[in-house]
C-alpha cells in the first residue's frame, strides 16, 4: 500500500505553530519592506544630493543606513532564518512545494540579497570616501538589487495563493507558476505600502536631526511620501482583491470578521492623519512618536493584513494543491504529482501514515482517544489549537451539548465530501471519525471544566 509521506507534526501547545509562523513573518515583513523602500529612497536622495550639491542629504542617507543595519539587516537576519525554520517544521510539504517549483528563483533572490547587504554597507561607509559618480552608482545598484529581491519573493507568495497560470497544473514550468495577475497586483500594492513603512521608520532618524530647517524639510518629504504611498496602497489593494480566486473571495466573506474592513480603513485613516499632522507641523515629530507609530503599523496594519492573506488561501498552503495539513489534495500532472485523497479513502488515514505507532493503526475502545489525538495532530493542528489558547481552538467549534456521535457525523459529512469552504477534504473511515470525535469531546469537557473552575460562563461555540 502506498503510504503518505507526511512528516512528524510540530505541535506547539500554547500559541500553535500557525501563530508562531505568523508572528515571525509579520515582524520580518516590517524589516524587509522598510529596507527595500529605503533603498529606493536612498537612490533618489543620492541623485538629488549630487545634482544639487546637498551634502546634508548624504548625511541623512548615512544615518538612516546605519539605523537600518540594525533595524532591518541584523534583526531581519534573525527573523528571516526564523521563517525558514518555523515554516520548515510547521509546513514541510508546503516549503517543499515552493522549493521544487522555484529553486532557481530563490537562488537568484539570494544573489541579489548578497548584493543588497554589501550595498548597504558601501552606501553608508563610502560617503565622501569615493568619488560622486561611484557612490551614485553604488546607490542605484543597491536600490535596484533590493527591489529585485522583493519582486522575486512576491511571485512566490502569489503562487502560495494560486499558480499564476492554470496551465501550470498540466504543463508545469516556473513561468506558468510565477507570473499571473495576482503577482503584479500584489507587487504594486506592497510597493506602495513599503514606502509607507519607510516614511514612518525614516521619521525616527529625521526627527533627531539637529539642523532645524533640514529636519523640517526631511520630515515633510517623508510625510508627503507617506501620504501618497498610503493613498496609492489603498487603491492598489482593490486591484489586488480583483485578482484573487473566487474561493478566496468566499473565504473573505465568510471567515474574516465583520470588523476587518472597517478596522483596516480606520488604521489607514490614522496613518494618513499622522502624515498630515507631521506635514503641517514637522517640529511636533519626535523619535519616540515615530517609534510608536512603527509599532502601530506592525500591530494594527501588518498583522491583520498578513493574517487575512494567509486565511484566504485556505484550505491550501501552497499552489492550490497542498492542503494546510500537508496532504496532497489534487493531481498536478505537470509535476507528476497525484492526489492522496483516494489512498486515504481506500485505506484510511491511520493506515496510510508512516510516522504512527502500530498500536494506533486499529481503533479500539481502549485507544480511540489516543487515535483521535493522533488524527487531530495530523489533520487539524496546523490550523487549530488543541488547547484553549492559540489559534482557532478546535473544541470551540462544537456545541457544549454535542455528543460524540454528533461530532463524528459532522466530521464524516463535512470532511469526507470536501464541501466545506475552509477545511481540506479528508475522507475519514467511520472508526476514525469516531476516534477523532472522542478526542474532540474530551477537549470540550476539559474546556468546560476549566471554565467552571474559573467561574466563567460557558461559551457556545461557532460552527464551521
Image: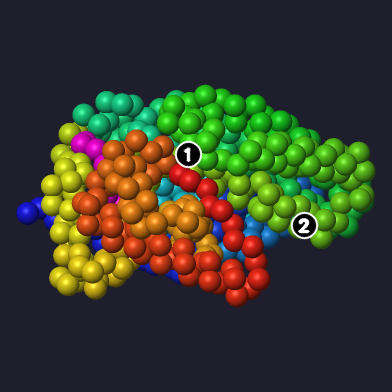
- Mark 2, other Cα within 10 Å: few <14 / some 14–19 / many ≥20: some
Q: Is residue 48 visible?
A: no
Say if the magenta span includes residue 330: yes
Foreground pick, 19 / 176: 19
The residue at which mark 2 appears reads as 292
Say if the magenta span includes residue 29: no
- Mark 1, other Cα within 10 Å: few <14 / some 14–19 / many ≥20: many
Q: Residue at x 38, y 34 (%)?
A: 162
Relative horizontal placement of residue 298, taking residue 4 as reference (left or right): right
- Between disc 2 and disc 1, whose residue precedes? 2
Q: Where residue 204 sits: x, y (%)?
A: 77, 55
Q: Residue at x 66, y 46 (%)?
A: 301
Q: Main secondary structure of the magenta part?
A: loop
Quadrant assignment for the N terminus: bottom left
Give the residues drawn in magenta, as a range.
Answer: 325-332
Which scheme is used to colour this image of the protein? rainbow
Relative horizontal placement of residue 32, taking residue 292 as reference (left or right): left
Location of residue 180 (image quadrant): top left
Foreground pick, 116 / 382: 382
Q: Residue at x 59, y 68 (%)?
A: 451
Q: Residue at x 52, y 62 (%)?
A: 390
The residue at which mark 1 appears reads as 312
Location of residue 265 (image quadrant): top right
**Alpha-carbon span between mark 2 and mark 1:** 30 Å
Amino acid at each position: 500500500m502506498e503510504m503518505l509521506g507526511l512528516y512528524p507534526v510540530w505541535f506547539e501547545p500554547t500559541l500553535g505553530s500557525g501563530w508562531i509562523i505568523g508572528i515571525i513573518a509579520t515582524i520580518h515583513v516590517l524589516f524587509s519592506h522598510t529596507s527595500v523602500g529605503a533603498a529606493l529612497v536612498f537612490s533618489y536622495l543620492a541623485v538629488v544630493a549630487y545634482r544639487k550639491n546637498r551634502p546634508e542629504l548624504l548625511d541623512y542617507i548615512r544615518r538612516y543606513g546605519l539605523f537600518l543595519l540594525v533595524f532591518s539587516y541584523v534583526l531581519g537576519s534573525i527573523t528571516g532564518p526564523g521563517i525558514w525554520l518555523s515554516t520548515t517544521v510547521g509546513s514541510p510539504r508546503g516549503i517543499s512545494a515552493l522549493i521544487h517549483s522555484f529553486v532557481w528563483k530563490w537562488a537568484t533572490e539570494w544573489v541579489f540579497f548578497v548584493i543588497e547587504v554589501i550595498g548597504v554597507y558601501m552606501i553608508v561607509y563610502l560617503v565622501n570616501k569615493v568619488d560622486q559618480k561611484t557612490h551614485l552608482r553604488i546607490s542605484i545598484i543597491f536600490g535596484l538589487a533590493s527591489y529585485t529581491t522583493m519582486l522575486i519573493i512576491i511571485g512566490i507568495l502569489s503562487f502560495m495563493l494560486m499558480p499564476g497560470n492554470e496551465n501550470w497544473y498540466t504543463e508545469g514550468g516556473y513561468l506558468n507558476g510565477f507570473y499571473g495577475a495576482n503577482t503584479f497586483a500584489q507587487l504594486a500594492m506592497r510597493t506602495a505600502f513599503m514606502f509607507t513603512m519607510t516614511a514612518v521608520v525614516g521619521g525616527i532618524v529625521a526627527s533627531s536631526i539637529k539642523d532645524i530647517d533640514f529636519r523640517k524639510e526631511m520630515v515633510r518629504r517623508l510625510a508627503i511620501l507617506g501620504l501618497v504611498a498610503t493613498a496609492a496602497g489603498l487603491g492598489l489593494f482593490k486591484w489586488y482583491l480583483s485578482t484573487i480566486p473566487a474561493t478566496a473571495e468566499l473565504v473573505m466573506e465568510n471567515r474574516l470578521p465583520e470588523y476587518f474592513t472597517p478596522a483596516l480603513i480606520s488604521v489607514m485613516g490614522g496613518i494618513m492623519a499622522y502624515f498630515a499632522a507631521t506635514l503641517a507641523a514637522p517640529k511636533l515629530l519626535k523619535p519616540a512618536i515615530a517609534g510608536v507609530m512603527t509599532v502601530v503599523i506592525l500591530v494594527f496594519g501588518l498583522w491583520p493584513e498578513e493574517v487575512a492573506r494567509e486565511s484566504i488561501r485556505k484550505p491550501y498552503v501552497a499552489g492550490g494543491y497542498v492542503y494546510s495539513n500537508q496532504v496532497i489534495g489534487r493531481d498536478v500532472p505537470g509535476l507528476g504529482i497525484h492526489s492522496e485523497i483516494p489512498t486515504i479513502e481506500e485505506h484510511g488515514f491511520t493506515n496510510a501514515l508512516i510516522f504512527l505507532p502500530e498500536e494506533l493503526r486499529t481503533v479500539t475502545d481502549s485507544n480511540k482517544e489516543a487515535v483521535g489525538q493522533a488524527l487531530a495532530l495530523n489533520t487539524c493542528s496546523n490550523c487549530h489549537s488543541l488547547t484553549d489558547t492559540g489559534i482557532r481552538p478546535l473544541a470551540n467549534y462544537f456545541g457544549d451539548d454535542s455528543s460524540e456521535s454528533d461530532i463524528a457525523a459532522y466530521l464524516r459529512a463535512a470532511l469526507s465530501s470536501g464541501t466545506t469552504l475552509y477545511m481540506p477534504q479528508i475522507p475519514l473511515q467511520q472508526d476514525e471519525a469516531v476516534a477523532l470525535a472522542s478526542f474532540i469531546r474530551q477537549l470540550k469537557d476539559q474546556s468546560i471544566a476549566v471554565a467552571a473552575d474559573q467561574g466563567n460562563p460557558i461559551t457556545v461555540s461557532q460552527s464551521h
